[in-house]
Image (cartoon, rainbow, N blue to C red):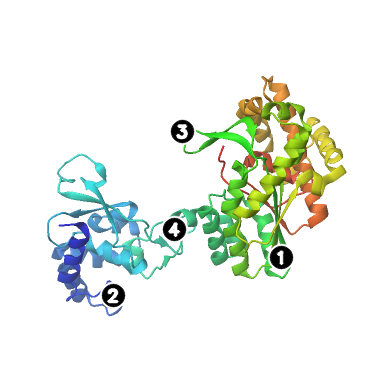
Amino acid sequence: MSVLQEVELSVSTAADVVESLLYLLQCRRDDDSAAFASALEALGMSANEAQSYWEFLDSPSELLWNEAKDNTEITQRFGLAISSRPSTPRNWLLYRVVSLALPDILQCELVGTRHMGGEESADNPADRLRIIFDRFPTDASSTKGQLLSIWRFLQGAAATQFSQAVVRAAGSLREELGADLGLRFAELLVEQKMLIPQPRMVALVSRVLKAGLDGQQVTLAGAFCPDYAYERTENPDLPYRYTFDGLGDGVGLVAQQFTRILPALSAFLTDLGVEHQVVLGIGDFEADNQDILDQVGVDRTEFFARCRRSLEAFRQAVPETVPLQLEMCWEDRAGDRLRPYSDAAFERMMAGDFGEMRTVFPDLDAIIERIPGQYKTFYERWFGRDMADREVLEVILKQAGEYAALAQITIEDLGRDVIMLAGDRPEMNRFNCFPEPLATLCAKRAY
């Protein structure tokens, strides 16, 4: 007999006694302990076990409730043990609780025998099955993603529509944007594989969103790398690796992050009624470095030409519903401002002056200290030669100066109701805050 067939059998045998666990709530409201116990006994419990639930519901502590382990401890797991015999599952109470919060929860998946994959024992016989649910209900009052237990449910607590991961991620967003919008925004970021900002950055992002809700136009801005050659890795956390042994004219690795993020983020803002535009550029200014040109095997003119073709490929990859403006960062926007701005920022950083960055990132010194060692091999591949640690630091800070310059130009041209989007390394996008604190949302690293 399949798991779903067994569940259906249990529904039919219990349906004449309790239509749903809402009946148990009614018994509690009516102070009818006999009816409460009868309903649970009809689901396969012993009289003593059924009585224990009534008593523990009156307990001020959920810790005592956990002593009734057969039907509560399992709410802390992503598997559920039931008997494989054609009889009512001992944990049917949990099935029914979960199904009230998530009606499709009974579409469970049998993944093998021996509950949770453990060894056979007196408490874990071989005839128990392991069942996986896609999602468990999270306590709506929780700010840390606690699962909704049976005790909390029967005390009248509600289940949130958001997953445990979203609730855990939403802390600062809920504080800044309110519970509903904060959770919805956190859900968007989690689903789109974006990093949840730290509290100080959350405040900056929230200010822009609130401005949009008040009728101001919001700009999503950013830049992506040219279509440098890359390869797959065997690391699921960093699935790609730049080789820099060529330059294409398609949608590059970082640009692919934007093609995933933009439609969802734009739709989210549209649903909120926030007028917005998206302004993205490609890093054509990297053609200003002869080491890079030599490494990818093209001259400056061809580098620019491939960047423009990459922009067109990107345009074709993004739905027309996204209000998108694409440009060459240097040729179309920054012009003769780029190098003076970036050089000035570089000189200040080399002298230990990181502008406004420390107001947003109090751990900045530790970040700066680890970046050279973390990315040394990356820059050696990019520039096609070995580098000493000091040279790596200088190269990083020169690139950081470019981030700072583009951020300053973005503020000058597009105003302050801007959220910078980043698809490359989050550490480098901290330099967006060099000229002034600037809202930034980063995708998780792909390389």
Q: Tell me the crowding category of disc 4: few under 14, some 14 to 19, or many 20 or more residues within 10 angstroms, Cα based.
A: many
**In terms of image quadrants, where is residue 404?**
top right
Q: Is residue 371 above or below residue 437?
A: above
Q: Which of pointers 3 and 1 lies earlier in the amino acid sequence?
A: 1
What is the three-letter code of the residue carrying label 3? Glu
Q: Amino acid at mark 4?
A: Ser
Q: How far is mark 3 from mark 1, CA to CA?
A: 43 Å
Label 2: state its secondary structure: helix
Discs 2/4, front? 4
- N-terminal of the pair, mark 1 or mark 4, is 4
Residue 28 - label: 2
- Badge 2, how many Cα within 10 Å: few under 14, some, many 20+? some
Mark in front: 3 vs 4: 3
Other-residue count near label 3 (Cα within 10 Å), few / some / many at <14 / 14–19 / ≥20 = few
Which labelled disc corresponds to residue 234? 3
Q: CA distance from mark 2 to mark 4?
A: 28 Å
What secondary structure is found at the residue carrying circle 4? loop
Residue 59 shows in this picture? no
Q: Quadrant of the C terminus?
A: top right
Badge 2 or badge 1: first in the primary sequence: 2
Name the disc covering residue 163, or none.
4
The secondary structure type at the circle numbered 3 is loop
Which residue is disc 1 drawn over? 211
Residue 150, how many percent across, how many down? 31, 63
Q: In terms of sequence position, does the residue under pointer 2 or pointer 3 come before the other? A: 2
Going from N to C along the chain, the mark reached first, 2 or 4, is: 2
* Residue drawn at x 34%, y 53% as measured from the top left: 76
- Tell me if residue 153 can be seen: yes
